[in-house]
Image (cartoon, rainbow, N blue to C red):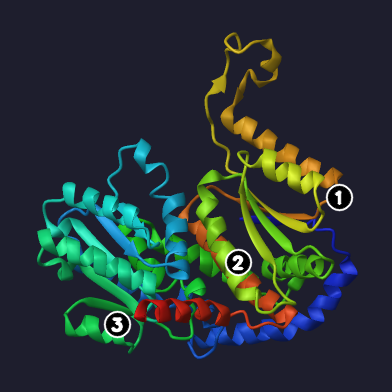
Amino acid sequence: MRFSFKQAGIPQGEYENYKEVVTPYIFRLQKISQSGSYAEPESSICLVSDESILAKAREVYKDKVGKPLKYVAVVGIGGSNLGTMAVYEATVGYNLSLREDKNPRVIFFDNSDERFASLALEHILKNTDNHKEIVVVIISKSGGTVETMANAEYLIQNLRGKFPQIEERMIVVTDDGNLLQKRASNLGITNLSVPVSVGGRYSVFSADGLTPLVFAGADISAFTKGALEMREACLSSDLDENPAFRGAVFLAYWYGRGKIIHDVFSFVPELEVLGKWYRQLLGESIGKSEDIGISPTVSIGSADLHSVGQLNLGGPKNKTTLFIENSAKINGENIENSDILGQNIDFIKGKSLSDIMQALTSGAMMAYESNGLSFAEVFFDGISEEEIGAFMEWKMIETMILGNILGVNAFDQPAVESYKKETERILKK
């Protein structure tokens, strides 16, 4: 994975100013990483070097999988779900409907949508004959998330009609010692814990993410390896080469100059959910008052070039952009015949679809540059679990540093609790 901040538009002197603010915080993160303890809000940085989490995920997998799996039902929402979905959708699950695949289908129950839930359940029941073909992973840090608990109850009560032993195929991932974990233990349901200090949006390298991913067929060793290597880069005291510091300064500097929207523009379509994962990370971590908050958006190239390109190039200059690109060359088939669609597109003859996508990517960035728009770039060396793990660790540490610069708590979410309380009040009535 490579980074470029040459079009970030930040004077070198500004980096020096931010170094004075951030250096003590980098030292703090280094100490937490070295301790391996989960006593601090930033303790999620310890997850990628905690080998016990990988070992436990594999142990549970070995215990549950005898007969080949057909379905993994992941029941969660937000941070307990998006990280897993991002890795799955980009790797083992990408375009699954268009190909033969030995990996099980993962179905994410992440919304209170009865039409989807009933159709998904009907599909699972129709295509399974044995309860051992299914694994149900229920993820809720608090143990009381309304959407998650409702989906879990709905799924279990309907699966139990055909498979009375369905509890044997369930895994609960939650905070240690809460009511959900106690209930699961009493019923003999396999349960795994997440460190209480690790918030959902920072939890993808805990049992939250690794457990469903190992059942999905993802390479969780490569996933954590990429993150571990990136953690070293992002905790480096050499801030000129530290990608998390550079990324946080890029956002903070322009936010202070009125650029309140940050667009993740991925020219790698399979990374769309990864953009949504980051949208939650940034929005929930930084939006803490009427005075402070960056609005994250997600765009996909080249599909969104007409809408987003017009808005960003012709509209208000209140945005920064992160372009995501794939630097791995795909040797695709060249387009050789232009007779069908006429001579007006002769310039595509001899080019592959990958060549055309690269031209679109370069053309978009040249237009941004000529219009004076600030952007950064990240280059994936192929789309793999290792590269996605690296990206996620980069963004999580970058967000911690950004919170430190802006003076906000990047680890709580008090406003989210308000909708949960109101929902509970309505349902109790």
Picture quadrant of residue 269: top right
Q: What is the crowding at mark 3: few (fewer than 14 residues within 10 Å), some, or many (at least 20)?
A: many
Mark 1: secondary structure: loop
Question: Which amino acid lies under the numbered mark 3 shown in the image of this protein?
Answer: Leu
Compared with 291, 215 (above or below) is above
Q: Which residue is mark 2?
A: 394
Residue 218 lies left or right of residue 135; in this view the side is right
- Residue 254, x across and y down, in percent: 80, 65
Q: Nearer the viewer, residue 282 or 93?
A: 282
Q: Which residue is mark 3?
A: 180
Picture quadrant of residue 185: bottom left
Q: Which residue is mark 1?
A: 372
In three-dimensional space, the C-alpha distance between marks 2 and 3, rounded to whole angstroms, equals 32 Å
Compared with 366, 30 (above or below) is below
Question: Which amino acid lies under the numbered mark 1 shown in the image of this protein?
Answer: Gly
Question: Residue at position x 67%, y 69% from top?
Answer: 244
Among numbered discs 3 and 1, the one appearing first in the sequence: 3
